[in-house]
Amino acid sequence: MRTVSNRVLPLAARYGSVLLAAVLVYYVIREPLNAAVSHISFPIKGAFHTPGPGNNQNGLPILGGEGTKDKEQLGPADTAEGMREKNLQKPIGEEDATTYVKKYKPDPIPFAPIGDHFPWLTHSESPPPVPENNLPPHPHVDEATPLLIGFTRNWPLLLQCVSSYITAGWPPEDIYVVENTGTFYANRNQELELQNPFFLNHTALGILGVKVVATPTLLSFSQLQNFFLNLALERDWLFFWWSHMDVLVLSDEDVKKNDRDHDWDHDPYATIYERSVGLLRYLNGPDMPPWATHFFAFDHLALVNRDAYLEVGAWDTQIPYYSSDCDMYLRLHWAGYWQPQSEAGLIFDVASVLDDIAALFRVPGAHATFKGDPIYVGASDDSSKDERAHHEADLKREKDMYPWVEKEGETFAHLVEVAGRMQDLKWLDEGLRRNEWQNRQTGGQTDPFYRDPEGFAAGLETLVDAGRRVFADKWGHRGCDLLAMGIEGKDAWRLERDWDIHKFHMNGVLL
């Protein structure tokens, strides 16, 4: 018997598996394919059509059959138009062999309706007074100090964010809420109800002294950032700050203990606003390198040098959400811009809202409580004896503070503790539910521009995934660690995707 060559065996194994797969695919799709084409007639010469009334000399059917034998025969264009009109006149679904039955998804688990988180503002034409030690400078500093806060969903969380900046010392007239709801003038005209995810109370923000700027339509995150840059161009702002809306900020009233670089002799205390202005002056001082961004707790609060962003092409709108920040900040880095980070105050990443936002203004009787506070939820069943004792001590301390808050208002120390618990709750279970706040309002079904909350969230997730794929294709790598990979700005769209590069060796041959 002839011995089979060692080179033939690998080839037989490779192509044999391909042949087997082709046979399997053929038998899997043959029946569905036959069923799909079984009702289609093909106008060809031969067995399908025979000469006779209604057929032409080649055996092809004449539209209309016998009724057209004495009339002018139709050309190809007329035939196509007649078939189109015939199909349009036929009721939709008449030819369907089966009736389509709609199958609905389970009803979403409803959230409790949101309430009034700032009763003072609802029943007054002026805001509570800002704590005296956090009042903004008067007169205003020489620099323009706009703070832009984008809003799409969850009005109470935005109201808390804005109020925290005001009570921390940022001038209200310098705060701009950028309404990015895609509801046009519906909020301005008070056409949306409170339970609508896109509800925004222009009147309340006006009472606080805050300005509202609306985007022309719903923008993605990267588009919104470019809108910020365009707004800065229109208003001649060389620099501006922007903040996420799911933060709660406090000026650090214990700053003497924490900031070694502060000038204690001349200014023993400075608000988050005053320290932010000081950093702007520092960055623009002599002998400083060109800079693009100054981060405060990454970009929960960020100071932007407008022209640096424009010089490198602004934000890539083909990366609409996640990964767009990686792309932007890396391109600025490759362009030689400095992007330092430091503290200017206390910035908490939160998803909860105080039951009464007036607590931030230290209004007597306004308590810093929030739904889901672990202090009031109770210790878990698997807690140790020491953990239970610690929890009981914390709960007692909270209750002991109640009379003081009723008479004097909240204290800075207690606000810090509560904000810390709010942040811990958001990042419980590694932040698995950190974005749940975006879907907390589910009403407004009869409002203009209504969007199903679950559908809106699902659409965003699709765009998020698409943006991540664009980022990966742009740089040939998944993830933000492009510097560690040795990737440079000139490599955009020029690299093979590293997750597709697999090298296999067989008998010394590279495949």
Image (cartoon, rainbow, N blue to C red):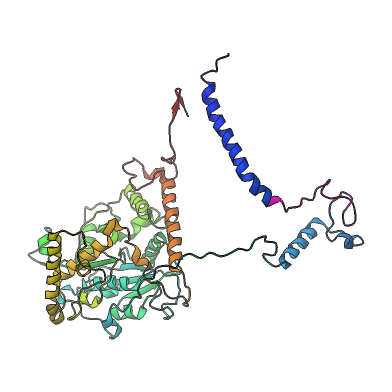
- Tell me the chief SS of the magenta region: loop
**Near-viewer residue (212 or 78):** 78
- Residue 398 covered by magenta stretch: no
Along the viewing direction, whichever of 87 and 6 lies nearer the viewer: 6
The location of residue 172, given as percent across then percent down, is 27, 75
Residue at the spot x=12%, y=78% of the render? 404
Q: Which residue sits furthest left?
A: 265
Quadrant in the picture for residue 101: bottom right
Q: Would residue 342 appear left or right of 466 to someone viewing this image?
A: left
Magenta span contains residue 53: yes
From the viewer's perspective, is residue 349 above or below residue 49?
below
The answer to whether residue 309 is visible is yes
x, y percent for residue 426? 28, 62
Indicate the quadrant where residue 440 lies: bottom left
Closest to the observer: 221 or 233? Answer: 221
Whole-percent x and y of residue 223?
42, 61
Instruction: Check the image and report above or below for 58 versus 179.
Output: above
Q: Position of residue 174 (x, y in %)?
A: 29, 72
Query: What residue is at 54 percent from the left and 22 percent from the top?
Result: 8
> Can the viewer see residue 236 in this picture?
no
Residue bounds of the magenta highlight: 36-59
